[in-house]
Amino acid sequence: MHAFVLDLKRISHTWTRGVPGVTFCRDIAEINDALIRLAQEGRRRLAPPAEQLADCVLRVAREESETSASAASASASSRSS
């Protein structure tokens, strides 16, 4: 199993750095590349028959979505002022 930590703030889940099977992404380019790899893996898993994927698990977790929404809202408000 492999995990990706996408941490634009660079301070969340720092304990995951150096853990085997974990890729810690902290800037836009690294996060972009990780999301592209995840999309490619998702497409790869759609290609074979489902019975071949019985033991494969792909999990995506998201944290602090309200932070992103708040930042986007604040940015939109400042542009309209």
Image (tube, rainbow, N blue to C red):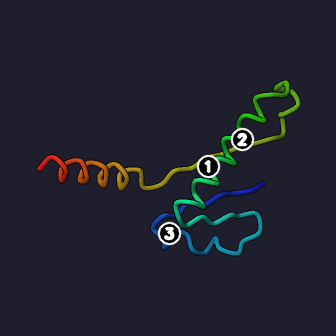
Crowding around mark 2 (Cα neighbors within 10 Å: few <14, some 14 to 19, many 20+) is: few
User: Residue drawn at (35%, 56%), measured in percent from left and top?
Assistant: 67
Q: Nearer the viewer, residue 7 or 56?
A: 7
Q: Nearer the viewer, mark 2 or mark 3?
A: 2
Secondary structure beneath disc 1?
Answer: helix
| Identity of the residue furthest to the top in this view | 49
Kind of residue sitting beneath label 3: Ser
User: Residue drawn at (74%, 42%), measured in percent from left and top?
Assistant: 41
Q: Which mark is residue 35?
A: 1
Kind of residue sitting beneath label 2: Gln
Residue 54 place in picture, x, y as percent: 83, 34
Residue 63, above or below 25: above
Secondary structure beneath disc 3?
Answer: loop
Q: Which mark is residue 12?
A: 3
Task: Tell me: 36 left or right of 55.
Answer: left
Residue 41, above or below 10: above
Quadrant (top left/top right/bottom left/bottom right) for the N terminus: bottom right
Task: Tell me: 53 left or right of 41.
Answer: right
Crowding around mark 1 (Cα neighbors within 10 Å: few <14, some 14 to 19, many 20+) is: some
Residue 78 place in picture, x, y as percent: 18, 53
| C-alpha separation, residue under disc 2 versus residue under disc 3 | 26 Å
- Whether tag 3 and tag 1 are in contact, CB under 8 A, the answer is no
| C-alpha separation, residue under disc 1 versus residue under disc 2 | 9 Å
Label 2 belongs to which residue?
Answer: 40
- Whether tag 1 and tag 2 are in contact, CB under 8 A, the answer is no
Crowding around mark 3 (Cα neighbors within 10 Å: few <14, some 14 to 19, many 20+) is: few
Residue 40 place in picture, x, y as percent: 71, 41
User: Residue drawn at (64%, 54%), measured in percent from left and top?
Assistant: 34
